[in-house]
């Protein structure tokens, strides 16, 4: 299995992994606010810094505009979504040898959990090769290094997907891989299930036209990539998966060189959820070939 060591991890407390019985899991459709792209006031090219910006520079030069949207519940409709068409797959009954303690240790994640992710992606996509290139743990708690992102976005664009292939594969292997089908897929897993607060909203790819996408310079200390912000448009269809459980995984396709399906997504505040039940999750990102 090919892996890359570019990771983001934060120690997770050893609190109980399930919500206590008095907490209710919100189900069904909900109306909530999502944050969409607002361009820079000077119409300059939008950017954000992944880490600390240089002196005098803002973390990002664009802002957000909030819109109330109806977010439907995918629960009970999982089989109606296809990653090739909708850029979403909701997978149930996934077995795992990774315990909660696994996710406290970066090397344990790569040793125990990465092979499970590779096996899942090979099975669900029919791909010939998987290259896992990083992961991020997100905690909806004050002071977390990486919190849920409450802004509609897509992790990759056409330009940055090609850049990813060339960054992680040597030439000429990368150039050969770019001749075939290649995708970037995030595998999203809850770490303190069932998820009640700060769930993930995701849009049906077929409901979001390319005109809604805006390339954002994603500035690392040593290179510049690109992500996509998303403009609000009427007709976008939004979904979430209520009360995600231990054995459930979301596949979020950020790029597909062949079929084009890509999934805008964002964390959101469910107004029905109770105070103090923060979401903990991990997303593993993969290059998927064939």
Image (cartoon, rainbow, N blue to C red):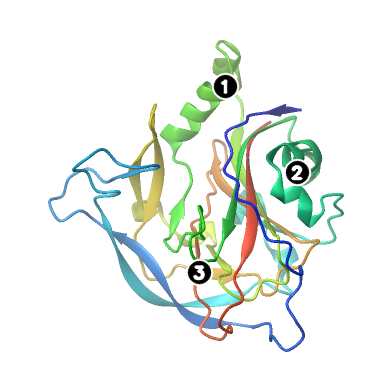
Q: Is residue 157 above or below residue 233?
A: above
Q: Which mark is residue 237?
A: 3
Q: Is residue 154 above or below residue 92?
A: above
Residue 12 image point, x, y percent? 66, 57
Q: Residue at x 54, y 62 (%)?
A: 204
Residue 236 image point, x, y percent? 45, 67
> Which label sits in the foreground, 2 or 1?
2
- The furthest residue to the left: 42
Residue 193 image point, x, y percent? 73, 68
Residue 272 occupies quadrant:
bottom right
Left/right placement of residue 154 relative to residue 199 reads left
Q: Which mark is residue 179?
A: 1
Residue 120 occupies quadrant:
top right
Instruction: Using a 10 Å C-alpha cutoff, classify the residue at mark 3 as few (fewer than 14 neighbours), some (14 to 19) or many (20 or more).
Output: some
Left/right placement of residue 119 relative to residue 40 reads right
Task: Give me the C-alpha separation between circle 3 and circle 2.
Answer: 28 Å
């Amino acid at each position: 299995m090919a892996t890359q060591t570019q990771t983001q991890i934060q120690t997770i407390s050893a609190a109980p992994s399930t919500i206590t019985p008095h907490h209710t899991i919100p189900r069904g459709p909900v109306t909530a606010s999502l944050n969409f792209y607002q361009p820079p006031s000077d119409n300059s090219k939008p950017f954000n810094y992944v880490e600390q910006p240089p002196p005098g520079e803002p973390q990002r030069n664009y802002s957000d505009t909030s819109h109330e949207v109806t977010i439907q519940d995918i629960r009970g409709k999982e089989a109606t979504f296809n990653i090739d068409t909708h850029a979403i797959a909701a997978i149930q009954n996934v077995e795992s040898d990774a315990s909660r303690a696994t996710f406290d240790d970066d090397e344990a994640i790569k040793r125990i959990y990465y092979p499970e992710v590779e096996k899942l992606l090979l099975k669900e996509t029919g791909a010939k090769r998987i290259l896992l290139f990083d992961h991020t743990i997100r905690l909806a708690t004050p002071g977390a290094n990486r919190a849920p992102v409450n802004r509609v976005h897509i992790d990759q664009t056409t330009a940055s997907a090609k850049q990813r292939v060339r960054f992680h594969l040597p030439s000429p292997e990368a150039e050969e891989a770019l001749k075939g089908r290649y995708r970037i897929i995030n595998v999203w897993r809850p770490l303190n299930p069932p998820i009640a607060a700060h769930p993930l909203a995701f849009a049906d790819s077929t409901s979001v036209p390319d005109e809604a996408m805006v390339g954002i310079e994603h500035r690392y200390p040593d290179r510049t990539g690109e992500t996509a912000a998303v403009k609000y448009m009427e007709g976008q269809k939004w979904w979430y998966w209520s009360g995600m459980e231990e054995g459930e995984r979301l596949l979020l396709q950020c790029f597909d060189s062949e079929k084009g399906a890509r999934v805008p997504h964002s964390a959101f505040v469910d107004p029905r959820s109770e105070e103090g039940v923060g979401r903990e999750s991990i997303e593993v990102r993969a290059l998927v070939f064939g």
